[in-house]
Amino acid sequence: MTDNNAAPKGRIMVVGGGISGLTTALEAAEAGYEVTIVEKLPSLGGRVAQLKQYFPKLCPPTCGLEINYRRIKDNPRIQVLTMAKVNKVDGGPGAYDVEITVSPRYVNEKCTCCGDCTKAVTTEIENSYNFGMNKAKAAYLPHEMAFPQRFVISPKIIGTEDANRAKDACKYGAVDLAMQPQKVNLPVGAIVWATGWEPYDARRIDNLGFGQYDNIITNMMMERMAAKNGPTEGKIVKPSNGQAPKSVAFVQCAGSRDQNHLPYCSYICCMASLKQSTYIREQYPDAKIYIFYIDLRAPGNRYEKFYKKIKEDPNTFFIKGKVAEVSETPSGEITVVAENAVTGEKIRQDVDLVVLATGMQPSASIERLPADLVFTEEGFIVNDYAKGGMFAAGCAAKPADVVSSNQNATGMALKAIQTLVKS
């Protein structure tokens, strides 16, 4: 007699634990397939976990992530490997051999997230989750919504007295300073690469002043600053002095649609800036907001309605013109210079804070993946459906928002399942 509850033969590996990876894994697992999620960071969630809100509904990422984490926790078919990296992929569709290295987090499953280890250590490290806008203790929980809910000891203090203090402070024996990297060899039938994206490095855009002037930040830095669990506890302020900005400029296409940087449209930047204008308006009802753009793109009826709503704000000004340069005045204001593409007038606008709408750079363009994949010139993965076996989901394949990424990830879960069925 056949056991209808038995899992089908073969396993699917999902590389990347952001929203695309989570959706792919859950769709495949809930269809009855064994899934392994391989995530390079200490926790799942990806870029979505760093957002204050989604657009256009303006609800927090906890809305979707908490549900997904619960589904993962309750599904025995899903294996999660964090702090893990794929070293090598051999074989072909239906029969891949994958080598993975799992780095030590120096904290085991006994962790209760009590925080005693954090209190014990004195060393501080740059908080990459907040894009370096503040420091974190060298024994830390990646963020409040981290999954798994387990602390991490930075390798920077291993072998020091600080590490010993963390170990001594733990009442549960969760701090294990003897942990070593582990090699995992995993046979899988299909692989979905959900490796996501990195914010384009604004320091490479010479004329926009990032890194030169304190009061110029990126759009992802704005997300963290506006978030309640961010470096300023949700207060949008000028980094130079912590004061409230009376005026803010958004510079669109910062590095995107530019042959010297990212030649393509990053799809989300316009909507992200419109959304972030609501963050400012909520805190500062009288602040002036200036949005410098080449073209404003609001794809779809819901996004178009959101754009029209923002346009109704009498203190929000849209300037069609590419920003040529920025500079700082003696009083500390930032001067944004652009040519108005409609009137031909050269505009010089002084503001307290500038937000650069930097684009999406596929992670695979920064660190190429160790597999037989085809890439575009920009580093996006090209799906070869005829060959099958390996597929790209979400922003690993093209720039996309959360909704589009989820839809695409569901499709890639189906493609991975089809590979196993054909094998």
Image: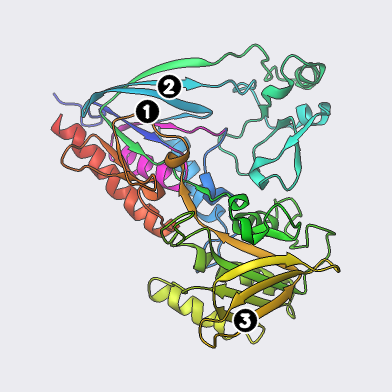
Between circles 1 and 2, the one closer to the viewer is: 1
* Foreground pick, 366 / 394: 366
Residue at 84% x, 29% y is 122
Residue at 47% x, 36% y is 73
* Image quadrant in which the C terminus is located: top left
Q: Secondary structure at mark 2?
A: strand
| Residue 310 falls in image quadrant | bottom right
**Mark 1 Cα within 10 Å, few/some/many (few <14, many 20+)?**
few
User: Which residue type carries mark 3?
Assistant: Lys
* Marks 2 and 3 close (CB-CB < 8 Å): no
| Residue 79 falls in image quadrant | top left
User: Which residue type carries mark 1?
Assistant: Pro
**How far across and how far down the image is residue 224, in percent?**
66, 54
**How far across and how far down the image is residue 240, in percent?**
81, 58
Between circles 2 and 3, the one closer to the viewer is: 3
Magenta residues (range): 16-41
Report which residue position mark 3 lands on. Answer: 346
> Is 233 drawn above or below residue 173 in the view shown?
below
Q: Which dot marks residue 100?
A: 2
Q: CA distance from mark 2 to mark 3?
A: 55 Å
